[in-house]
Image (cartoon, rainbow, N blue to C red):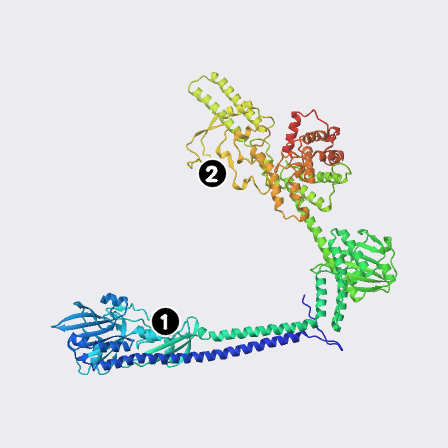
Amino acid sequence: MKVTMTIKKAPRNIAFHWHLAYFFVGLMVFFALISTWYFQSATERLLLIQARESFESINRSASSQVNEIYSNAARSIELLAEQRLMRATTLKERLDSLPYLVTALRSQASLASIYVGYENGDFFQLRPWRNEAALQTHFQAPPDTAWVAQSIEMAQRESRGTYLFFDQNLQLLERVSKDDYFFDPRQRSWYQSAKASAGVKSGQPYVFFSTGKVGVSISQETGNRLAVVGADVRLETIASRLMEHKGTPDSRFLLLSAQQEVMASNKGLPDLSHVVDGKLILPNLSQFDGRVMGVLRDQYAQRKGSVFSFEAAGDIWEGMIRTISVPGGEELQFWAAAPHAELLAPAIAVRNQSLLINATLLVLGVALAMLLARMASRPLVQLNQEALRIARFDFSQAIKVSARITEIVELASSMDKMKTTIEHFLDLSQALAAETNFQRLLLRIVSDMRTLTQAQGGMIFLADPSERQLDLVHMQWDKQQSGPIVSLSALDRAAEHLHPIVQMLDQQQELQTLSAEQVSRHFGFLSAVGYHACAAATLVNLPLKNKNGELLGVLALLLPSGQTLSVELLAFARALSTTAAIALNTQRLVEEQKTLMNAFIELLAGAIDAKSAYTGGHCQRVPVLTTMLAEAACDIENGPYADFNLNEDEREALRIACWLHDCGKITTPEFVVDKATKLETLYDRIHEVRMRFEVLKRDAQLASLQAQLDGADAATLAPQLAAALAELDEDFAFVAHCNEGGEFMAPEKIARLQQIAQRTWLRTLDDNLGISHEEKARKSTPEGRSEIDLPVLEKLLADKSEHLHQRSARDQMAADNEWGFQMKVPELLYNRGELYNLSVARGTLSEEERYKINEHIVQTIIMLEKLPFPRHLRLVPEIAGGHHEKMDGSGYPKRLKKDEMSPLARMMAIADIFEALTAVDRPYKKGKLLSEAIKIMGFMKKDQHIDGELFELFLSSGVYLVYAQKFMRPEQIDSVDLSPYLKATASNSDSNSDSNSDSNFKVNAA
């Protein structure tokens, strides 16, 4: 909880205001942010102005460079136009001008070549040799070549091409005639444009004929009009000049033609792959850089001639477009663009540095302010530490604070009182919350409240669900106290003459002074039960309500006359009564929940007993007998169980485990539990067998009648028919007797069953009609047909594949299962073969059915393990699931030995067996006599199937007899000689087959 402290300045004391420190810190942050913002904005404006000036400077430089290149080339052309080369008519004469041409080329690095086109079609060109792949491929120049001259002479309308290769000294290295070198300069655009008008002409970029390079031609007609002199300026020369202006890393500088074709860029020359029919097609602006420069072009229409900002490629850019005049040609365009993120990078860096400096200063300022505040607030820190101790419920030290601030001194004193009050309140609250017995809780509430308020007497009333009636359940007077009060009438809130307690409750009063007459009239019951009331008194009435505001009861305290409660003490009592109400409500809810849970448990056990008459009242009697044996173990003072004892939680766990020890039987099919004959499932299949015998008898009669029709003697056939029918009757009687399961099936009986089973009867009806799809699936043959041809002969008794019920994956049990079960699981879920079931050696249950019966304890453990039992009931699954284990480890389902079982589980095993042996509400057996049951259990003790020490306690304590008198019929209770079973050395000579039979009976019955 956040506590806000308002500290006022007292005279001659120091007042401290934390909000001043926060104000100054905030002010520092505000000014730092404002100054940083202003400085960054100003820097950005300056940088943008600088960027625009830089663009203008680059434009001027680029314009100057372009003009210089074009102008120098133009001057060279003008000078050459007056040279004798223009008048030369032979190759020899033209070669005489090589030194002059070489001088011109050397003086201007931007020139790629100089050439002359004559009116008669002759052509002469000189170029400096560059070690380029295209040139080498075209000319195949010899080593040391420095200059290449190209000549075309027209003679009788035939051209003679010649390549001449010179070294640096203009010494001829090689002369190559090229018959395939045909070039008519008069067809070229530079020639034609120069002839069209006087002066120097600049052409559009195109592919040079000899080198395939892209460049610009500058040409001029000679004075005698017999020739045109020209020079090639390569575009990479212009681009190299343009690339000298780097700008920012992502800046773009472009030189465009009048048609907005990209001629040069600071990022390099454009792609020269667009050549069609020998004519160059340079990439346009969109193809070269449409994302940025395309947006600049769109903005240019509105902002022509200015530097402006625009948005492109997810950033803000600064852009500019300028035109460049070209001598003798169309104007070129210079385009420039740069992203703000790069232009303003210095401003951002400065801003970050400014923020860092401001942050550093701010941290130092805050540290200094906090240091000064800490020095002034040291007493508050001490109080805070004391508050933390209270928050940790540490009340071991008194609060001591050295301070000059009046408010802090007063606060320390208040906190010390609060600490004492909280400590007292918590002690009482913990005592109330720790009480788990409802009746003791009621008495504790009255006692603690009397002690707190120094009341002479106290009473507690509980409200009924309608809140209209208050029942007095506990009271205490002076040092005397009373338990639950049951003989006094309740307080009716609707009575005409209201009782002071009811009246104060309705009017929400907590204190009222009572006269002696009022005490005598309204609290006369005090003397009626032996207590002495005071004369006049002060009544303290504290309602007990739950969190929903519902009335649980009333706590009434009587103070001596003239005594009252201070405001603080009344508030404390009110708070404590709220805690008492919570504890009271919690205990009541716990009691109600326990009652509800017990009702559900007993309901489930009753449902299991009611599910089948074969279990009778087993689930209801086992808890009684187990509890009796456990109490006997607690009461004994000598022997192995002298130290055995149970607390309330353990008794509750035992009781729940006893009631739920057979809850797994709810999953056991009734037809298995109630199986009284070997062929019984949901019905007794002996009736089917009987009908088959009836069919055979009819067949025998029909056969006899048919023989008579065929001429046989009736007198002769009659004895034969009678003998056949008698044999069938005798065979059925034998089969029916085997079905009862009352006797051991000797091998000769099984052999006779198999012999009888070989009889056949004729079936003419499809046995797939009217049955479920599951049964049809079991009857299907591997070929998918369940029947072949009708009629068909069937054996009288048979084990068919359709009788086999496969065990699904859900019914499997892994050897390493999580519960530790160690039971042999039959391969099949059920085997309902007729011969198989009739051949069961003992009883009526097959191996699969006996496992299904025993599986109830597996299901019991699984079901109980899944229940979220509270900690004190965590042993319920172990106690309930161990009553079929044996001390020698041969039991089930986990094959536990004695030392692996709790005493309570071993007690339940004895109770479970004894109840099963003596129960008289089982339709399949009679209850054993008391002596017979003890005799059987004596054998089980000897065989280490039950705990011998507990069995002796069971007998010596008389638990067996108390149980017998309560639950067994009088005729079952006979005299029992206990001496053979209470002596460890006693041996019983009657350990014969009869005892083994009784022991087997126990296993089945339980």
Q: Is residue 334 left or right of residue 925?
A: left
Of the image marks 1 and 2, the number of the one nearer the N terminus:
1
Percent coordinates x, y for residue 810 in the rendering? 54, 42
Check disc 2 and give the amino acid type: Ala
Residue 267's disc is 1
Tag 1, which secondary structure? loop
Front residue of this view, candidates 396 and 118:
118
Q: Which residue is mark 2?
A: 777
Residues at marks 1 and 2, CA–CA distance in whole angstroms: 81 Å
Residue 99 shows in the view: yes
Question: Which residue lies at the image location 52% right of the left edge and 30% below the top edge?
Answer: 834
* Residue 673 in the image, given as x and y percentages of width and height: 60, 36
10 Å neighbourhood of mark 1: few (<14), some, or many (≥20)?
some
Residue sitting nearer the eye, 872 or 911: 872
Q: Is residue 217 visible?
A: no
In the rendering, which numbered label is found on residue 680?
none
Q: Is residue 780 above or below residue 524?
A: above
Q: Are marks 1 and 2 in contact (CB under 8 Å)?
A: no
Give the left or right position of residue 4, taking residue 473 as reference.
left
Q: Amino acid at mark 1?
A: Lys
Above or below residue 246? Residue 825 is above
Mark 1 or mark 2: which is in front? Answer: 1
* Image position of 625 with respect to 273: above or below: above
- In the image, 344: left or right of 80? right
**Secondary structure beneath disc 2?**
helix
Q: Position of residue 399 (x, y in %)?
A: 76, 65
Q: Quadrant of the N terminus?
A: bottom right
Q: Position of residue 798 (x, y in %)?
A: 50, 29
